[in-house]
């Protein structure tokens, strides 16, 4: 037994090998990616992106981060260039679906301006049609969530129809 005032000196040991940086960073990278996924599920995409970028930087350094960001920019640009043809096809399919629904519908014909396709092709097109986003109008009208005001030509939620006609329609 040693007296309580005697200090213990550790026995000399062989120098321990530090963990390999790649393995340590690998675990850190995976934990950052897990955290990014959690942030994304919490509705915080900006923080999730920061966590992903930190994980990339910890794994491959600044050069890997730059390469990844360049590749993301390329993919984004390619996707933007391909979008117009996809929008045109979606618009055409929506017009076909609306025309088919109208032809099979036994309802009496509606008044002028109630057909979204006719309204979009008219000279008095709304701002969405002018900016090349006709599909939004067609989808909203087709699913019944919105209506096109016959007085002003605007697209509004069906739940706000009475308020629009009573208070907001500039031609009422």
Image (tube, rainbow, N blue to C red):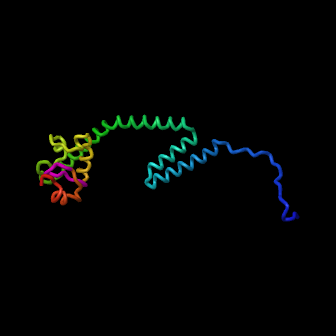
Nearer-the-camera pick, 141 or 57: 57
Is residue 148 shown in magenta? yes
Q: Which residue is rendered at x = 46% and y = 54% of the image? A: 41
Nearer-the-camera pick, 46 or 5: 5
Q: Is residue 89 left or right of residue 167?
A: right
Q: Is residue 46 left or right of residue 120?
A: right
- Dividing the picture into quadrants, the one containing residue 94 is top left
Is residue 150 shown in magenta? yes
Location of residue 43 in the rendering, given as x and y in whole percent from the top left corner: 43, 54
Q: Which residue is rendered at x = 14% and y = 54% of the image? A: 107
Q: Is residue 8 left or right of residue 34?
A: right
Q: Is residue 159 above or below residue 15?
A: below
Location of residue 79 in the rendering, given as x and y in whole percent from the top left corner: 38, 37
Q: Which residue is rendered at x = 25% and y = 55% of the image? A: 145
Q: Which residue is rendered at x = 40% and y = 38% of the image? A: 76
Q: Which span of residues is magenta-colored?
A: 144-154
Q: Is residue 167 above or below residue 31?
A: below
- Dividing the picture into quadrants, the one containing residue 83 is top left
Location of residue 141 in the rendering, given as x and y in whole percent from the top left corner: 23, 50
Location of residue 26 in the rendering, given as x and y in whole percent from the top left corner: 60, 44
Magenta part, dominant SS:
loop
């Amino acid at each position: 037994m040693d007296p309580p005032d005697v200090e213990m000196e550790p026995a000399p040991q062989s120098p321990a090998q530090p963990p390999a940086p790649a393995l340590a960073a690998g675990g850190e990278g995976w934990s950052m990616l897990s955290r990014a996924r959690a942030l994304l599920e919490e509705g915080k995409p900006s923080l999730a992106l920061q966590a992903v970028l930190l994980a990339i930087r910890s794994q491959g350094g600044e050069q890997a981060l730059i390469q990844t960001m360049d590749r993301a920019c390329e993919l984004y640009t390619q996707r933007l260039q391909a979008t117009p043809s996809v929008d045109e096809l979606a618009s055409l399919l929506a017009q076909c679906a609306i025309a088919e629904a109208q032809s099979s519908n036994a309802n009496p014909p509606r008044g002028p301006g109630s057909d979204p396709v006719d309204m979009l092709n008219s000279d008095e097109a709304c701002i969405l049609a002018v900016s090349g986003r006709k599909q939004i109008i067609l989808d909203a009208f087709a699913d019944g969530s919105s209506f096109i005001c016959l007085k002003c030509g605007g697209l509004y939620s069906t739940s706000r129809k009475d308020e629009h006609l009573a208070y907001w329609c500039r031609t009422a």
